[in-house]
């Protein structure tokens, strides 16, 4: 009798933990977005502008790229925006680095021919003291630099 009671308690604890972990996770995943071409009207001093919907872009050596990343509803701002290969695509100071709330700005310059990937992450935006789903979105934009 005691064994049955302990098993019921253990199952109840596991089910409760699973239910709490799943709170807020329904519909939390972002739907895939179609690829968007780079902007033909980048910001001041930039040759190309990309956003969170851009999947790939090609630059020439010497061109400057501006990344304008908009936070999705229920998500934190994009952070950790970086180049996977700074020898090909080097980060530079963005002179227009003042962004509106929910927008992350980053800037890069094509240094030499090759490939790099711009990455950034965003997590769930949760109120303090509330249960929060533990997932993260990864942004990846493939950059090809040609001579």
Image (spheres, helix red, strand yellow):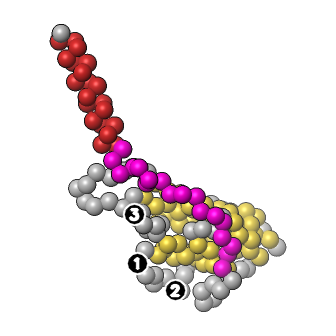
The answer to whether 32 appears left or right of 14 in the picture is right
Q: What stretch is highlighted in magenta?
A: 22-39
Q: Which mark is residue 74?
A: 3
Q: Where is residue 17 in the image (x, y as percent from the top left)?
A: 30, 37
| Distance between mark 1 and mark 3 Cα atoms | 14 Å
Please tell me how crowded label 2 is: few (under 14), some (14-19), or many (20+) other residues with Cα within 10 Å.
few
Residue furthest out toward the top: 1
Circle 2 SS class = loop
Residue furthest out toward the left: 2
Q: Residue drawn at (30%, 30%), measured in percent from left and top?
A: 14
Q: Does residue 116 appear anywhere in the picture?
A: yes
User: Do labels 2 and 3 touch, CB within 8 Å?
Assistant: no
Q: Nearest the camera: 91 or 2?
A: 2
In this rendering, the answer to whether 21 lies above or below 2 is below
- Residue 43 lies in quadrant: bottom right
In this rendering, the answer to whether 62 lies above or below 4 is below
Q: Residue drawn at (30%, 42%), measured in percent from left and top?
A: 20
Q: Which mark is residue 101?
A: 1
């Amino acid at each position: 009798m005691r064994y049955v009671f302990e098993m019921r308690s253990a199952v109840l604890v596991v089910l409760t933990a699973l239910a709490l972990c799943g709170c807020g996770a329904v519909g939390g995943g972002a739907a895939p977005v179609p690829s968007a071409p780079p902007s033909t009207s980048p910001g001041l001093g930039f040759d190309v502008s990309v956003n969170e919907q851009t999947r790939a872009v090609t630059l020439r050596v010497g061109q400057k790229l501006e990344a304008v990343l908009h936070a999705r509803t229920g998500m934190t701002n994009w952070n950790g925006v970086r180049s996977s290969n700074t020898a090909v695509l080097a980060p530079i100071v963005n002179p227009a680095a003042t962004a509106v709330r929910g927008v992350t700005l980053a800037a890069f310059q094509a240094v030499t021919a090759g490939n790099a990937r711009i990455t950034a992450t965003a997590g769930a935006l949760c109120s303090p003291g509330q249960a929060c789903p533990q997932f993260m979105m990864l942004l990846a934009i493939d950059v090809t630099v040609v001579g």
